[in-house]
Image: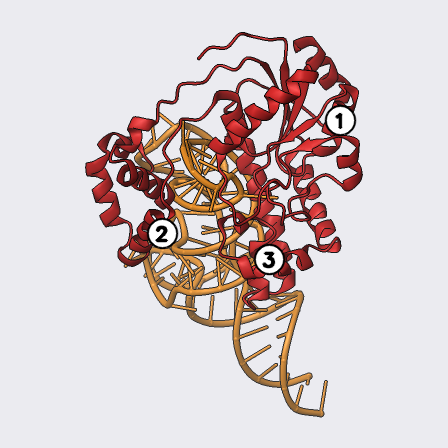
Amino acid sequence: MEEKKTNKCLIIIIGPTGVGKTDLSIRLANDFSTEIISSDSRQFYKELTIGTAIPTPEQLLKIPHHFIHIRSITDYYNACMYEFDVIDKLHSLFQSKDFVFMVGGSGMYIDAVCKGIDEIPDVDMKLRSMLIERINNEGLDNIRAELKILDPEFYATADIRNSQRILRAMEVCLQTGKPFSSFRLKTPKKRNFKIIKVGLNREREILYERINQRVDEMIKNGLVEEAKELHKHKGLYALKTVGYNELFDFFDGIISLERAIELIKQNTRNYARRQLIWFRRDKEIHWFHPNQEEEITKYINQNI
RNA sequence: GGGGAAUUACCAGAGUGGCCAAAUGGGGCAGACUGUAAAUCUGCUGACUUACGUCUUCGGUGGUUCGAAUCCAUCAUUCCCCA
């Protein structure tokens, strides 16, 4: 499995939403004459533009971006698929480039590219909906008890109050006939390219202000109209996304537009916080303020 | 000018003599997280303390009481109704 090391390098710009990754990464990619892979799990969807703050058309024209608008919200896409697609893309990009940038804030997807993610057989959607149905009807207790028998190892360490975790483990057990934990090897994969992780962060208060301002801008730029178009698909998982969910509640008459905007800001702030908590665990990340462009360039050049 | 209602921790808001450092929700903070992860879940949130616990809080002041966020007096502020 171990591949020969090359002099190729993936430079990852990591940071919470709204911190200023896009502008900086475009300048960096320009300086390094290379391209950008998005690691943002909502920019994948071609129906989502304003609410996911994808780069502007001018920016996209200047620097080629990958993994933006590659799927439909009706498609199924996950971190494992992303891993394979990105590795594949890197393989071809590294034919002509020595460096490639990856920019985004979806921690699990970034980790999937850096370390790989265990391959677990696909689950039949019908099985999943059946289980969801059961959880809705009988609650979580029964499923939990069954999972305890099917996969005691997972059960012992799992967050059993989290229905999503229980559901996932259960569906894999039922689909494969093997315990979910038997697939979770968690052995990091070796990559044949170097990885540099640059983290961007700024004072919490300022970050929150930027988020609030950006939401107002999104509204001005037509987020309400964009969400209106998607309202009919509101059950889709890909649309359980900050900026859309809240507006759906507005369209449904549950909350006012003002309240929806307020909630978008709030939920985005909470999301940014969770991103930071995820990234904090990763000791390979070197942190900078987005203004420290010179230092960042220096750091990259020293570590390439 | 007369009558009524209110004032509780960051915010909203419950509590009407001891079980109240004060419900609940929100926010905030901290954290978990291998698959649609911008999701989902957990803990903390007066001060000091690792903890046991101690101390200071419920608009201000003064009182009643063994004991007050809760009762009384008074002052202040806000809102509503009548002039």
Question: How far apart are the two marked residues, 1 and 2, measured between alpha carbons?
Answer: 47 Å
Tell me: residue A68, above or below residue A126. above
Say few, some or many: other residues with alpha carbon within 10 Å of mark 1 (under 14 / 14 to 19 / 20 or more). few
| Quadrant including the N terminus of chain A | top left
Q: What residue did someone put label 3 on?
A: A230
Callout 2: residue from which chain?
A
Front disc: 3 or 1: 3
Q: Position of residue A175 (x, y in %)?
A: 29, 39
Horizontal side of residue B45 vs A175, given as left or right: right
**Amino acid type, mark 3:** Leu
| Quadrant including the C terminus of chain A | top right
Q: Position of residue A9 (x, y in %)?
A: 63, 15
Q: Position of residue A184 (x, y in %)?
A: 35, 26
Tell me: residue A23, above or below residue B20. above
Callout 3: residue from which chain?
A
State the residue at coordinates (71%, 33%): A22
> Who comes first in sequence, dot 3 or dot 1?
3
Q: What residue did someone put label 1 on?
A: A291
> Who comes first in sequence, dot 3 or dot 2?
2
**Amino acid type, mark 2:** Ser
Q: Report whether residue A64 is seen.
A: yes
**The colour assigned to chain B within the rendered structure:** orange
Say few, some or many: other residues with alpha carbon within 10 Å of mark 3 (under 14 / 14 to 19 / 20 or more). some
**Which is more toward the observer, A209 or A113?**
A113
Front disc: 1 or 2: 2
